[in-house]
Amino acid sequence: MRIVFLTLVILSFLHSDEIQRIEAVILEITQLRNNYKECKTELLLGKTQENQKINQELNKKIEKLEKIVKKQDELLKLKENMAKNQFPKLMMKKEFQKENLEKNSVIKFKATAFYLKEESVIYDAIDGKRIDKWEKNTSFTSNKKTSNWIQIGGYFVDKKWKSAKKEMWIKISQVSKKHLKECK
């Protein structure tokens, strides 16, 4: 009987080690689960904190941009107000205005032949760009003039008259009226 008792005691010790091992494994598993939950909550907190920081930075940028937009709006309003001059425009005296209008007003008359007294420059408008240079004694016709300019309506090339395709002007001081002999 002693042998049986001893075997039971030895077997119980052998099995108790395994039970203790199983209990130790269970404790480790529960600790790992707890650690996992803690890490998960820390990660969530970290992400929310990062998101909060990003949101704060974005809000600061939005505020800065809104301030810039307000400043630009104010500058635009100031420029609009500056563009509108509160003071009236300076006007010339009426007597001088009339003289300028008379100088530049175009007068129509009966078409007449003219010739150049000297080599002359042809312009595209009154006080415009130079477009050509004509020789002395070149003939042309006109029916419009101002006080200082005469418009070329047509011109003679090899004794044949051609209509002017574009607007041409010449200074009246360089022109003489052609006296035509009347045919009977």
Image (cartoon, grey):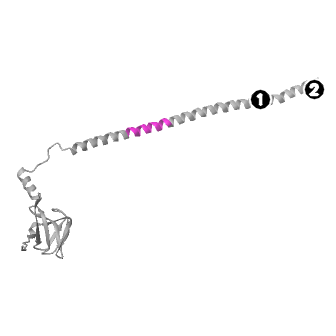
Q: Please indicate whether residue 181 sits to the left or right of residue 7 in the image.
A: left
Q: Residue furthest right?
A: 1
Q: Residue furthest front?
A: 184
The stretch in magenta equals: 51-64
Where is residue 29 shown, x and y percent of the image? 70, 32
Earlier-in-chain disc, 2 versus 1: 2
47 vs 172, nearest the viewer:
172
Q: Amino acid at mark 2?
A: Ile
Q: Residue furthest left?
A: 95
Quadrant in the picture for residue 56: top left
Which residue is identified by label 1?
A: 20
Return the mark for residue 3: 2
Q: Residue at x 57, y 33 (%)?
A: 42
Residue 59 inside the magenta-drawn segment: yes
In terms of depth relative to the viewer, which is nearer, 145 or 59? 145
Q: Is residue 5 above or below residue 39?
A: above
- Residue 174 in the magenta stretch? The answer is no
Examine the image and state in which quarter residue 4 appears. Answer: top right
| Magenta stretch, main secondary structure class | helix
SS at mark 2 in the image: helix
Q: Amino acid at mark 1?
A: Gln
How far apart are labels 2 and 1 at the CA level?
26 Å
Q: Residues within 10 Å of mark 2 (few under 14, many from 20)?
A: few
Residue 102 location, quadrant = bottom left
Q: Is residue 95 above or below residue 170?
A: above
Percent of width and height locating residue 79: 25, 44
Percent of width and height locating residue 120: 14, 71
SS assignment at label 1: helix
- Residue 18 image point, x, y percent: 80, 31
